[in-house]
Image (cartoon, grey):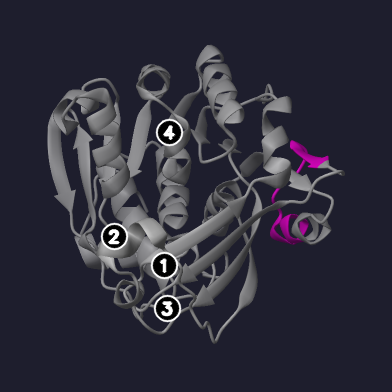
Amino acid sequence: MSCLICGSLAYDTISDYPGRFADHILPDRIHALNVAFDIPTLRREFGGCAGNIAYTLRMLGGEPVVLGTLGRDGGDYEARLDALGIARTHIQVAHDLYTAQAHIMTDRDNNQITAFHPGAMSRSHLRPVPALAGLRLGIIAPDARQAMLDHAAQLAAAGVDFVFDPGQALGLFDADDLRLFVAQATWAVFNDYEAAVVLKRLQLDAAQLARQLRGLVITRGAEGCDVWADGACTRIEGLAAAQVVDPTGCGDAFRGALLWALERGWSLLDSCRLGNVLGACKIACAGPQNHIITADAALAAMRLAYGAAESVSG
């Protein structure tokens, strides 16, 4: 069964700042901010939320179908997807634009400052959700505003269960937009900051929002995640990573594992446990698409950390 990943494809330019941003930002001068950070490292990675999610899903043996857009400089990314065995039948190329670019700087406390140029992503709405035999699951990951609105409506109209994951695109949507997404989605996944924003805009608490969905997940980094399902909230503790190298893409790794497990009919709780395993795996690697893990290894790590799970067979 294929899983449709609707979202961004981008190149990430990533740098690490060995100090703390907070040491150079004066709260009483924030209205006149003028700072520069000396960054000793610089690398370019394949990224974008759809690309990152599809990568982890593929590592676990899933069959992701990416719905997104590359630019005229996207040849390397096309070759990358081919090498991974990820179909690009539904990826369009805007030859007059550059592929979306994210410039990400991370300090020693894992705080991040990101500048993002959407480029070809602004055309994502021109490619509709395809009619795929056997498609039963999808995700609306961060993308251009119109693409997210259109693709969510198209998945809902087709009767396809999907995860709503606005991520850093959350600022594109007002309360009415968010109510529409929630009405169409099956599950929603936010980090704790995003959840606070959504709840404030909708004037709801988490329990009230969760009742409008089959499940609500609020991730909390190293602390794990809160999972709302069947009228109850369960805290799933996080896993200690072998080492903390780079947080970029950890949320996407979590979501890739979540989708893989949901495809197989796992409970939301067990799906999120597996998500925690992949998040801990990813943070130990530089870049959002360089962690290596098999489904067997991920399941073994999950059992070691959380014990037996009713959803998991084999």
Q: Mark 1, residues whose alpha carbon is within 10 Å: few (<14), some, or many (≥20)?
A: many
Q: What SS does tag 3 mark? A: loop
> Pointer 4: what residue?
163
Which residue occupies the foreground of this view, 69 or 120? Answer: 120
Q: CA distance from mark 4 to mark 2?
A: 19 Å
Amino acid on which the number 2 mark rests in the picture: Gly
Whether residue 270 appears in this view of the structure is no
Residue 304's spot in the image, x, y percent? 25, 68
Point out the tag, 2 or 3, that comes first from the N-terminus: 2
Query: Does the CB distance between marks 1 and 4 fall below 8 Å?
Result: no
Tell me the kind of residue under disc 4: Val
The residue wearing badge 3 is 245
Q: Earlier in the sequence, mark 4 or mark 2?
A: 4
Distance, label 1 to label 4, CA atoms, is: 22 Å
Query: Disc 3 versus disc 1: distance between alpha carbons?
Result: 7 Å
SS class of the residue under badge 2? helix
* N-terminal-most mark, 4 or 3: 4
